[in-house]
Image (cartoon, helix red, strand yellow):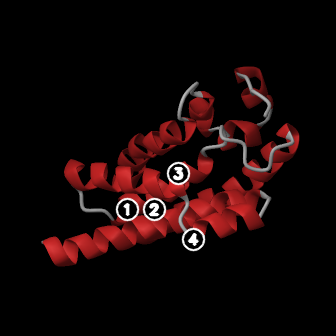
Amino acid sequence: MPTPSWRFVLRHPAHTLAFGFGAGLAPAAPGTAGTLLAFPLFWLLQPWLSPIGFMLLLAVMFAAGIWACDKTGRALGVADHGGMVWDEVVAFMLVLFFTPDSLYWQAFAFLLFRLFDIFKPQPIRYYDRTFKNGFGVMLDDLVAAFYTLLVLALWRVFAG
């Protein structure tokens, strides 16, 4: 697998976005770095937008991610390069939107999301293996976000 550099990331806006403005260049656990990037972006943007505005922003970010990850994957010759982390950023911002406003809940959401993203239970694994384009890159993390929100909702119902 090719090892992209800052030069590659800054060469095209699609690469910059797909690599989470450089978070995907982390030498270890780039997906975790991308997921962590969602925190400051969420905390910065969420107070300024209505719930509908925030969801619309996420839809635009998702669509931009399809384009950016597809273009970047083609440039690298790897459909879902580990350094492309925009999928984690967008999906985890969705999780944060529906997670209670508490560091305890957000930390638990982070751990759950990373577990689902790493271990890819079905149907996440199916989508990851079937769709080899920008949409596939974005889709499997969206399903991981759904699983995360489902577990959080069940925990909230049964534990709280």
Check whether the beta carbons of the residues at disc 2 and disc 1 lie within 8 A of each other: yes
Q: What residue type is labelled 4?
A: Gln
Numbered badge on residue 94: 2
Q: Residue at x 59, y 66 (%)?
A: 124
For residue 3, side relative to residue 155 (left or right): right
Q: Which residue is drawn at 37% across and 62% down?
A: 97
Instruction: Calculate the distance from the C-alpha at mark 3 to the C-alpha at mark 4.
Output: 12 Å
Q: Disc 3 on helix, strand or loop? A: helix
x and y percentages locating residue 155 in the rendered image: 24, 70
What residue is shown with label 4?
122
Which numbered disc flags the more N-terminal residue, 2 or 3? 2
Instruction: Calculate the distance from the C-alpha at mark 3 to the C-alpha at mark 1.
Output: 21 Å
Q: Disc 4 on helix, strand or loop? A: loop
Whether residue 60 can be seen here: no
Q: What residue type is labelled 3?
A: Ile
Q: Disc 2 on helix, strand or loop? A: helix
What residue is shown with label 3?
118
Q: Which quadrant does the C terminus fall into?
A: bottom left
